[in-house]
Amino acid sequence: MAGNSFGNLFKLTTFGESHGVAIGGIIDGCPPGIELDLEAIQAEMNRRKPGQSAIVTQRKEPDEVKFLSGVFEGVTTGTPIGFVIENSNQKSHDYSHIKDSYRPSHADYVYDKKYGLRDYRGGGRSSARETASRVVAGAIAKQMLKNVKINAFTSSVGDIFIDKPYQDLDFSNIESNDVRCPDSAIAEKMIDRIKQIRKEGDTIGGTVTCVLQNVPIGLGEPVFDKLHAELGKAMLSINAVKGFEYGSGFCGAKMKGSEHNDLFNIDGSTKTNLSGGIQGGISNGMDIYFRVAFKPVATIMQNQETINKDGEKVEMHGKGRHDPCVVPRAVPIVEAMAALVLADYLLINKTYS
């Protein structure tokens, strides 16, 4: 299986399956001498882990990170950073009913056709549990970035949206509620909606907005390695993501150039920021902001028609512990992937500038 690594100079390779002994990763290219705040890394893991509230999956995993190499006395050594996260609360029997059948909108069918076999216990490598390793690497990348601020938040659940621009939101409120929405009134509506959906045995999607501030000018390359292209790739690699837009996004397609152009201030900043902090594929020092769309979780607690490995039509009913809405737990994953992209481009900029 190819495609288990992300990044160029700051590179993460992940390994492990949802119901295996452990998951983990190797970070190659992390510079030496970075004093790591291990508690901050674990705090990021706690934001992503299952069982943290009533509106997420009730699988109980401590998600404690164990570093095997590359860190000595809390400081990076410049050698590969190896780490593991043990799996401790698997219930593989919850998946016995899909051993020979394919869940609608899951990777089951294509895995079987591509590889000739599949790990049906939680989806194996296609499980969102793999993203825990990304959060570890992203937490380290954040500590490399120093002055850069990365804030992601839930901006919609179903048809419930924050109707304010991000500049009017207080990011310190993101962690004040279970859905990770900085608008408390909207957050209550989102939580009620998710609880209602769970009672119905269904799931619902939503969006995560991410804002990157104090990004230095000059990150990104002007042709194939545009900064927004790599951010898009990073976000679209996250489980359940169906869309990515930055800056004015699709709304910009409705505008005239005279409306959309960001006019310059004398210091090189711009009066508006419809470009989303990136011009010609290169960061311009303004805020980078983007939105990521997540589909409803595919496993629902309702009867659905599907097929088995013999091509026969069968009926399936979801079992086990699943998120009714993946968006609240996706917030730290979005931040982590953004941090990985910025850390990689920061090293590329230093190498080739």
Image (cartoon, helix red, strand yellow):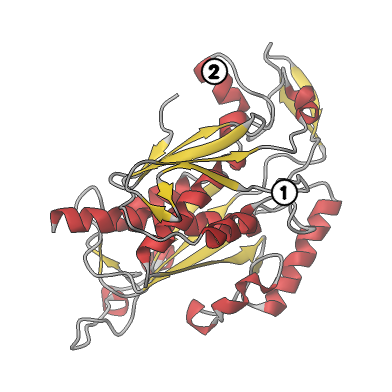
**Most foreground residue, 243 or 250:** 243
Q: Is residue 336 left or right of residue 307?
A: left
Residue lying at the far bottom in this picture: please name it.
266
Residue 254 visible: no
Considering the numbered disc 1 on the image, is that residue within a helix, a strand or a loop? loop
The label on residue 113 is 2
- Sequence-wise, the earlier of marks 1 and 2 is 2
Is 284 situated above or below 106? below
Residue 68: % across, % down? 49, 40
Residue 148 placement (x, y as % from top left): 38, 70
Residue furthest right in the image: 199
Instruction: Identify the residue shown where x is 64% and y is 34%.
Output: 18
The residue positioned farthest toward the top in the image shown: 310
Q: Is residue 138 left or right of residue 343?
A: right
Q: Secondary structure at mark 2?
A: helix
Q: What residue appears at the point 75 percent right and 19 percent down from the top-left corner?
A: 313
